[in-house]
Amino acid sequence: MRGVLITVVLGVALVAATLPALVRQFYAPVPDTAPGAAPAAVVVPGAGRQRHGDGYRLTPAGLRRLHRGVEEARRLGLPLLLTGGAEDRTPRDPDDSEAAMMAELARRLWPEARTWIEPRSRSTWENAVNSAPLLRERGIQSVLLVTDRAHLPRATLSFRRQGLTVTPVAVDTLPREAWLPSAGALAEVPVIWREWVALIWYRIRYF
């Protein structure tokens, strides 16, 4: 009897983990938008690169972030700051960086795009630390920050810690059908838990 009960409970939990409406409840809360000047640039942090033949390509997460960032920049008529280095190292050549790859694709999507790159970052914290001086050099204090919903709380807090005013914009990775079981929703669960762990670590170390 106990085995049957455990099986039923596990089955219900598994089904629940496939429902976007329920999975959405596990996201960490996004900090409220702080009052301040209107954003003067759109910032898109990279999501890593993956091997492709003899070179690299952006990950699906990175492509989603970039497409939304270009969409927002075009809508608002703002420049794009694209930030990301090369895995666990700082590339010697800025063109050998995730940020450079993102900038190239951004200009294909929107030929009139004004792009700046920050090619040295290896983490979300470094995205923020290295981007802040580049923004201030251009007289920019307020930004629109575009990243995945799961990643948005940690990214927002990291950029605000640099004294920037941040308007967070989420790239939703969950399917639209809230109550329709989805493998996409199930795949988002470990991403959410990983972000919770990273957020706790960042609070201990940085915030």
Image: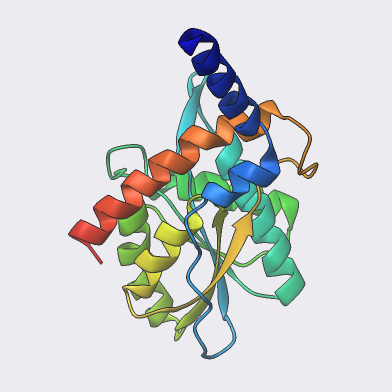
Where residue 97 appears, as percent x and y from the top left, is 42, 44
Q: How many marks?
A: 0
Is residue 54 something one can see in this rendering? Answer: yes
Q: Is residue 44 left or right of residue 73?
A: left
Residue 40 appears in which quarter of the rendering? bottom right
Where residue 57 appears, as percent x and y from the top left, is 54, 32
| 9 in relation to 19, above or below | above
Q: Residue 79 versus residue 161: which sits nearer the camera?
A: 161
The quadrant in which the C terminus is found is bottom left
Where residue 87 appears, as percent x and y from the top left, is 35, 37
| 112 in relation to 9, above or below | below
Residue 71 appears in which quarter of the rendering? bottom right
Residue 144 appears in which quarter of the rendering? bottom right
Q: Residue at x 47, y 33 (%)?
A: 190
Q: Residue at x 60, y 35 (%)?
A: 60
Q: Residue 33 versus residue 47: which sits nearer the camera?
A: 33
| 44 in relation to 3, above or below | below
Residue, far left: 205
Protein image colouring: rainbow
Is residue 131 something one can see in this rendering? Answer: no
Q: Residue 25 versus residue 171: which sits nearer the camera?
A: 25
Q: Residue at x 60, y 42 (%)?
A: 23
